[in-house]
Image (cartoon, grey):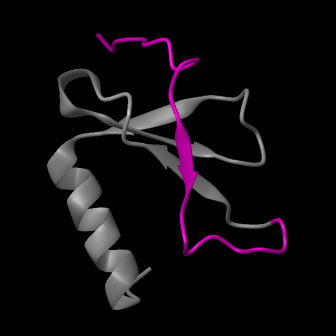
């Protein structure tokens, strides 16, 4: 069973690796973290769904982006 959280109060941060031309826009929130989860969404569709990542999964994703692996 998956949990549903109200993310309306979350403060979203656009990734510095996002494309400034309207593509590949990823946002995440540090202010809303139930059970340590990191919400992630497509900034082009802010009213759309958000995924939540476990802290270790988020850390692995960020590390891969920084290495240029993604």
Q: Is residue 6 left or right of residue 60?
A: right
Q: Is residue 24 left or right of residue 28?
A: right
- Which residue is depicted at the point 22% across and 61% down? 59
- Per the image, is 4 magenta? yes
- Which residue is depicted at the point 83% across and 65% down? 22
Q: Nearer the viewer, residue 58 or 20?
A: 20
Residue 4, relative to residue 21: is it above or below?
above
Residue 31, relative to residue 7: is it above or below?
below
Residue 33, relative to residue 54: is it above or below?
above
Q: Residue 33's quadrant in the figure?
A: top left
Q: Residue 54, image x and y in percent?
A: 22, 41
Q: Is residue 46 left or right of residue 3?
A: right
Residue stretch rendered in magenta on the structure: 1-22
- Which residue is depicted at the point 63% across and 70% down? 18
- Per the image, is 14 magenta? yes
Q: Residue 46, image x and y in percent?
A: 72, 35
Q: Residue 57, image x and y in percent?
A: 23, 53
Pick the quarter of the image with the N terminus.
top left
Q: Nearer the viewer, residue 62 or 10?
A: 10
- State whether the magenta stretch is mostly helix, strand or loop: loop
Q: Nearer the viewer, residue 36 or 49?
A: 36
Q: Residue 23's quadrant in the figure?
A: bottom right
Residue 62, relative to residue 6: is it above or below?
below
């Amino acid at each position: 069973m998956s949990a549903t959280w109200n993310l309306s109060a979350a403060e979203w941060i656009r990734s510095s690796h996002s494309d400034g031309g309207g593509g590949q826009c990823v946002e995440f929130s540090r202010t809303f973290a139930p059970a340590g989860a990191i919400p992630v969404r497509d900034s082009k569709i802010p009213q759309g769904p958000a995924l939540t990542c476990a802290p270790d999964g988020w850390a692995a994703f960020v590390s891969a982006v920084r290495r240029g692996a993604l």
